[in-house]
């Protein structure tokens, strides 16, 4: 590894071992080279205890051509390398997390409703303008409260209705213990 600090993106030891809450992709918009700081990855580190630090010689660099994508678990130790070239290394880093967890990037601030309302619904569902499950993700419209219901689906902030409202689990839906 060259400079900077490297680490895993996911829970930081909060989620029990064996659960992979996040999957990442980094698309090379320009060639990734050793010189411009291609992403460092420590293979196998997703199986390490959270306390284990990586040695420099345990990392490899994802040298790849523009248009390629590197896919890695959120629990893999990784990071950008030192850019010794005279240009920035352009890439698109897209991370997917389980719908009931916080996202790595806070999409409600990066893509607030006035921007997100111009996106396709598939994309707004993915970035969080949809229920994660029954009652996970509703909001109260501060300008319309208290006249309006306080369980407004997130899509309403974009001027849309949800495709589907998740159903609440009831005791009828819970299996009897065997
Ligand atoms: O800059 C890179 O190549 C990787 C960036 C990244 O995924 C990170 O630092 O979390």
Image (tube, rainbow, N blue to C red):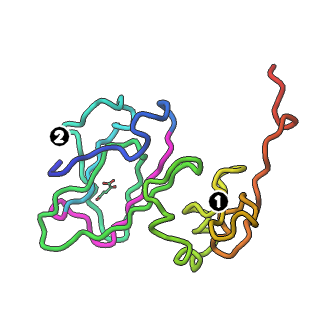
- Please state which of residues 4 and 135 is positioned toward the viewer in this rendering: 135
Asked if residue 40 is among those painted magenta in the image, a careful observer would answer no
Q: CA distance from mark 2 to mark 1?
A: 48 Å
Q: Which residues are magenta?
A: 20-36
Mark 2–mark 1 CB contact (< 8 Å): no
Q: Which residue is mark 1?
A: 139
Q: Residue placed at 76% from the left, 58% from the top?
A: 165
Q: Which residue is mark 2?
A: 57
Q: Whole-percent x and y of residue 152? A: 71, 62
- Please state which of residues 31 and 81 is positioned toward the viewer in this rendering: 81
Asked if residue 25 is among those painted magenta in the image, a careful observer would answer yes
Q: Residue placed at 57% from the left, 76% from the top?
A: 119
Residue 83's place in the image compared with 73, above or below, is below
Name the element at disc 2. Answer: helix
- Please state which of residues 63 and 178 is positioned toward the viewer in this rendering: 178
Looking at the image, the residue that sits furthest to the front is: 146
| Label 2 CB-ligand 1 distance < 8 A | no
């Amino acid at each position: 590894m060259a400079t900077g600090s490297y680490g895993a993106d996911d829970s930081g030891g909060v989620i029990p071992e064996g659960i992979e809450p996040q999957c990442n992709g980094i698309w090379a918009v320009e060639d990734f080279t050793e010189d411009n700081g291609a992403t460092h990855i420590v293979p196998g580190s997703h199986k390490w205890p959270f306390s284990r630090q990586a040695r420099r010689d345990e990392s490899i660099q994802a040298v790849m051509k523009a248009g390629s994508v590197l896919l890695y678990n959120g629990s893999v130790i990784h990071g950008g390398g030192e850019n010794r070239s005279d240009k920035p290394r352009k890439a698109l880093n897209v991370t997917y997390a389980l719908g009931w967890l916080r996202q790595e990037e806070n999409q409600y601030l990066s893509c607030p409703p006035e921007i997100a309302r111009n996106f396709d619904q598939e994309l707004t569902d993915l970035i969080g303008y949809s229920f994660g499950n029954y009652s996970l993700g509703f909001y109260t419209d501060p300008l319309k409260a208290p006249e309006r219901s306080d369980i407004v689906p997130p899509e309403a902030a974009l001027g849309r209705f949800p495709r589907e409202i998740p159903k609440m689990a009831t005791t009828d839906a819970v299996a009897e213990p065997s």
